[in-house]
Amino acid sequence: MRTMRVARLIVHARSRQPVLVLAETDGDRCLPIFLRRPQADVIAVGPRGADDPLLPQDVLVPVLRGLGHQLDGAELTELTDGVFSAVLVLDGGTRVAVLPSDALAVAVREGLSIAVAEEILDAVGQPVEEVFPDGTGAPAQQQVEEFRSFLDGVTPDDFGTPDR
């Protein structure tokens, strides 16, 4: 597994779908992941602050704590026929399969680690300098404003069910 960081949240020009771009923390590859809009909205809000209103994903951590568990991070574990598989990691090793977009939304909101299987990066990872020739360092506020601007002009028809 390779540790990743959120590089950018962008909108794919042709499909108008939100895309989360993860970048290796200690490498030069990045990985674009198409998201469902509700999870992209959560990621655009960013990490949960103490005074922020709670979002649906935010209930997970208190429930797990109440049951005596700790949420450690999210992992993208496989890529099969263009579809990612993901898990949430609990208690230092227990893995629970979830939708990749949900795993990423929870990880971003809670400030948890995100890891991607080396095999995925070998298969579809892209060099960061090719995807972002000017770097990935756009200020977070600018990224949020760009994404909100996209959301203002989008309609439900822009998010049809993808062909599988």
Image (tube, helix red, strand yellow):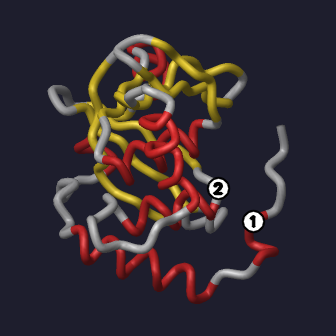
Q: Position of residue 103 (x, y in %)?
A: 52, 39
Instruction: Residue 37: give its label.
Output: none
Mark 1 and mark 2: Cα distance apart in space: 8 Å
Please rate how many residues cluster around mark 2, counting C-alpha atoms within 10 Å: few if below 14, some from 14 to 19, many from 20.
some
Q: Position of residue 22 (x, y in %)?
A: 36, 42
User: Quick one: 5 or 132, which is closer to the camera?
Assistant: 5
Give the side of residue 5 with respect to residue 154, left or right: left
Q: Position of residue 42 (x, y in %)?
A: 49, 62
User: Quick one: 144 or 93, which is closer to the camera?
Assistant: 93
Please rate how many residues cluster around mark 1, counting C-alpha atoms within 10 Å: few if below 14, some from 14 to 19, many from 20.
some
Instruction: Residue 159: give its label.
Output: 1
Whether 30 is drawn above or below 17: the answer is above
SS assignment at label 1: helix
User: Quick one: 26 or 14, which is closer to the camera?
Assistant: 26
Label 1 vs 2, first from the N-terminus: 2
Mark 2 — residue? 36
SS assignment at label 2: loop
Disc 1 and disc 2 in contact, CB within 8 angstroms: yes
Query: What kind of residue is marked 1?
Result: Phe
- Identify the residue at horizontal 28%, vertical 65% (top origin): 49
Query: What kind of residue is marked 2?
Result: Arg
- Identify the residue at horizontal 17%, vertical 59% (top origin): 137
Quadrant location of residue 44? bottom left
Whether 2 is drawn above or below 51: the answer is above
Quadrant location of residue 30? top left
Q: Position of residue 138 (x, y in %)?
A: 20, 66
Give the side of residue 32 with respect to residue 30, left or right: right
Whether 106 is drawn above or below 8: the answer is above
Give the side of residue 50 with respect to residue 53, left or right: left
- The C terminus - image quarter: top right
- Identify the residue at horizontal 39%, vertical 78% (top origin): 146
- The N terminus - image quarter: top left
